Image (tube, rainbow, N blue to C red):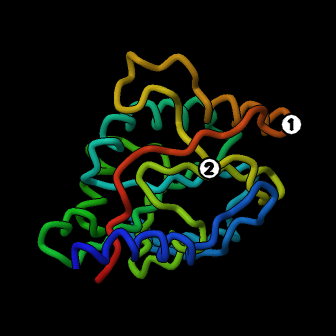
């Protein structure tokens, strides 16, 4: 099996759709930590979808920056967090709704946090890691898919805030400038 894994990963990645700039937001309706189902059809204006995890050290290192960004654009940008990691195994129980609810409360996320239990949403978006950021303009078209900033896991190392620049461009009615750098983080924990 060890020899097959390098062969399987590129095959699985090739099968995942990759959203391109201008593609519409894939539709979804997912349960949230608040007990309600939130559907993509109810989201208005520019929307930022962030794929998160309760256990990933990259997410934990970026949480304060993600919350600050969401708070800075309150009323002008809708932010939605989605957890797509499997939560059936003992090692991943914290990735389920109960663990998500605890993390949401402890961190004071200023946005909805939803569970993609069957992993159809992460597949539709083509996301591969946490955190991963998908910014859609006011017409529901993908404007930016990439990293939060250039700091990696360290806030003190940030010199460029890629996502903030993209949000500001979208809010000003412009496409984000420059080439988006991919997100870095923990791989999605796929089922079975």
Q: Between label 1 and label 2, give the one nearer the viewer.
A: 1
Q: Is residue 23 left or right of residue 156?
A: right
Mark 1 burial class by Cα count in 10 Å: few <14, some 14-19, many 20+: few
| Residue nearest the observer in this picture, 124 or 73 | 124
Residue at 35%, 25% (x, y): give it: 154
**Quadrant of the rendered image containing residue 117:** bottom left
Q: Residue 109 at x, y = what percent?
A: 41, 44
> Residue at the right extreme?
173
Q: Is residue 189 above or below residue 105?
A: below
- Earlier residue among tags 1 and 2: 2
- Across the whole image, how many numbered discs are drawn on residues? 2
Q: Which residue is mark 1?
A: 174
Residue 169 location, x and y as percent?
78, 33
Percent position (x, y) of residue 177?
Answer: 78, 32
- Report x, y in % for residue 82: 46, 61
Q: Secondary structure at mark 2?
A: strand
Q: In terms of secondary structure, where does tag 1 sit?
A: loop
Q: Which residue is mark 2?
A: 48
Query: Foreground: 38 or 145?
Result: 145
| Residue occupying the far front of the picture | 3
- Say few, some or many: other residues with alpha carbon within 10 Å of mark 2 (under 14 / 14 to 19 / 20 or more): many
Q: Give me the residue at 18% from left, 69% from top.
A: 93
The numbered disc on residue 151 is none
Query: In which quadrant of the rendered image does the N terminus lie?
Result: bottom left
């Amino acid at each position: 099996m060890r020899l097959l894994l390098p062969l399987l990963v590129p095959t699985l990645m090739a099968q995942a759709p990759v959203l391109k700039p201008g593609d519409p937001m894939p539709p979804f309706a997912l349960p949230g930590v608040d007990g309600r189902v939130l559907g993509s059809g109810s989201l208005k204006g520019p929307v930022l979808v962030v794929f998160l995890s309760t256990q990933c050290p990259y997410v934990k290192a970026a949480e304060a920056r993600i919350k600050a960004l969401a708070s800075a654009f309150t009323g002008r940008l809708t932010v939605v967090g989605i957890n797509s990691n499997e939560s059936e195994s003992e090692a991943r129980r914290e990735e389920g709704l109960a663990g998500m609810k605890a993390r949401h409360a402890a961190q004071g996320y200023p946005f909805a946090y939803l569970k993609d239990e069957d992993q159809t949403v992460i597949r539709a978006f083509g996301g591969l890691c946490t955190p991963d950021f998908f910014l859609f303009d006011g017409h529901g078209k993908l404007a930016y898919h990439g990293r939060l900033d250039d700091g990696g896991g360290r806030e003190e190392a940030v010199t460029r805030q890629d996502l903030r620049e993209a949000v500001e461009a979208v809010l000003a009615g412009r496409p984000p400038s420059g080439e988006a750098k991919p997100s870095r983080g923990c791989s999605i924990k796929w089922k079975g």
